[in-house]
């Protein structure tokens, strides 16, 4: 009997030393940490959720739950209005996980973070340009993504905003009598943001400015472009009235200058 006990004792000691923590327990623990963060997000406690996900990443840095948690940190920052942090965490994730299956969502959160920082047209439009570039990247990289449709809508809004800025500056120059500077701004609004809803007014302002300079042929050309693309627009009606006051009419398309022909190529599909 003593011999049997002696033989069994080393086996018992070895089992005690080498028995690892059950894998199931680890999995259960990491899921619990992740779900804790998710529940905190659902309750609107975003800051605590961020802390939970960061704790998850510290304890299990190479787990799929930690990767998911990083995306939720970006989301939580976005929901709190911490857009700079959301942009930074999104860009960090994109850099570290270029093959992530839901990478389009991180690009989308990044773009929205720029978008929600857009200010009115009287102020610097750097964030508007950043948002425009970010949404264009989504449509280019992920054309079939569920976020691509909204990205296209946001692109239109960003371009309208930037074009509105050009018009505001152009109108300012007009009031000062700096008509060439104004025309350059209005032309830029049309050429750069050709699908913007600001285009009809920009063309009308060009007509105004050229008439003020006494350059009737260019005013007629601009009016022809306006009438070609927006024949029912009030801006065209107003431009036509201005020309009539000087016994002028918009040029026929075949009689246009090179400037007009280039404009027609750029804006003829605006209404499509």
Image (cartoon, rainbow, N blue to C red):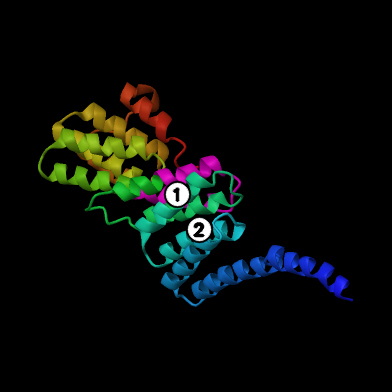
Which region shows up in magenta? 133-161
Image point 66% across, 66% down: which residue? 27
Q: Position of residue 161 (x, y in %)?
A: 33, 50
Front residue (pair 55, 204): 55
Image-quadrant location for residue 256: top left
Closest to the observer, 141 or 243: 141
What crowding class fits label 1: few (fewer than 14 Cα within 10 Å), some (14-19), or many (20 or more)? some
| SS at mark 2 in the image | helix
Residue 248 in the image: x percent, y percent?
A: 25, 33
Residue 135 shown left or right of residue 144 in the figure: left
Q: Look at 33% across and 57% down and name the residue there.
A: 117
Residue at the far left in the pictured view? 176
Q: Quadrant of residue 115?
A: bottom left
Tell me the quarter of the image containing the N terminus.
bottom right
Q: Residue at x 53, y 54 (%)?
A: 105
Return the mark for residue 203.
Answer: none
> Is residue 139 found inside the magenta-colored segment of the image?
yes
Query: Where 115 sits versus 14, above or below?
Result: above
Name the residue nearer the viewer: 114 or 16. 16
Q: Earlier in the sequence, mark 2 or mark 1?
A: 2
Question: Which residue corresponds to mark 2?
Answer: 70
Viewer can see residue 211: no
Question: Crowding at label 2, few (<14), some or many (≥20) Cα neighbours within 10 Å?
Answer: many
Q: Looking at the image, do the residues carrying marks 2 and 1 touch, with CB atoms under 8 Å apart?
A: yes
Give the x, y percent position of residue 260. Answer: 34, 27
Q: Judge whether residue 32 is colored magenta.
A: no
Relative to residue 26, is residue 207 depicted above or below? above
Question: Is 39 drawn above or below residue 146 in the view shown?
Answer: below
Secondary structure, mark 1, is helix
Q: Which residue is mark 1?
A: 92
């Amino acid at each position: 009997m003593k011999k049997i006990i002696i033989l069994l004792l080393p086996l018992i000691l070895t089992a005690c030393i080498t028995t690892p923590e059950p894998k199931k327990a680890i999995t259960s623990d990491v899921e619990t940490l992740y779900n804790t963060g998710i529940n905190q997000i659902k309750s609107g406690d975003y800051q605590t959720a961020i802390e939970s996900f960061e704790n998850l990443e510290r304890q299990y840095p190479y787990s799929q739950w930690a990767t998911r948690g990083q995306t939720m940190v970006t989301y939580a920052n976005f929901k709190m209005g911490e857009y700079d942090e959301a942009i930074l965490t999104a860009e960090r994730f994109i850099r570290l996980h270029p093959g992530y299956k839901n990478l389009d969502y991180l690009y989308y959160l990044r773009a929205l973070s720029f978008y929600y920082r857009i200010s009115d047209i009287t102020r610097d439009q750097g964030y508007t340009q950043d948002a425009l570039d970010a949404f264009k990247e989504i449509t280019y990289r992920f054309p079939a993504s569920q976020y691509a449709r909204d990205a296209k809508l946001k692109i239109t809004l960003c371009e309208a905003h930037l074009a509105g800025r050009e018009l505001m500056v152009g109108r300012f120059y007009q009031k000062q009598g700096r008509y060439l500077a104004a025309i350059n701004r209005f032309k830029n609004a049309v050429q750069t943001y050709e699908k913007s809803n600001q285009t009809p007014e920009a063309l009308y302002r060009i007509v105004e400015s050229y008439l003020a300079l006494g350059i009737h042929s260019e005013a007629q050309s601009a009016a022809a472009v306006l009438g070609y693309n927006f024949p029912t627009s009030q801006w065209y009606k107003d431009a036509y009235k201005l020309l009539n006051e000087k016994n002028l009419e918009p040029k026929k398309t075949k009689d246009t200058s090179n400037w007009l022909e280039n404009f027609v190529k750029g804006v003829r599909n605006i209404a499509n």
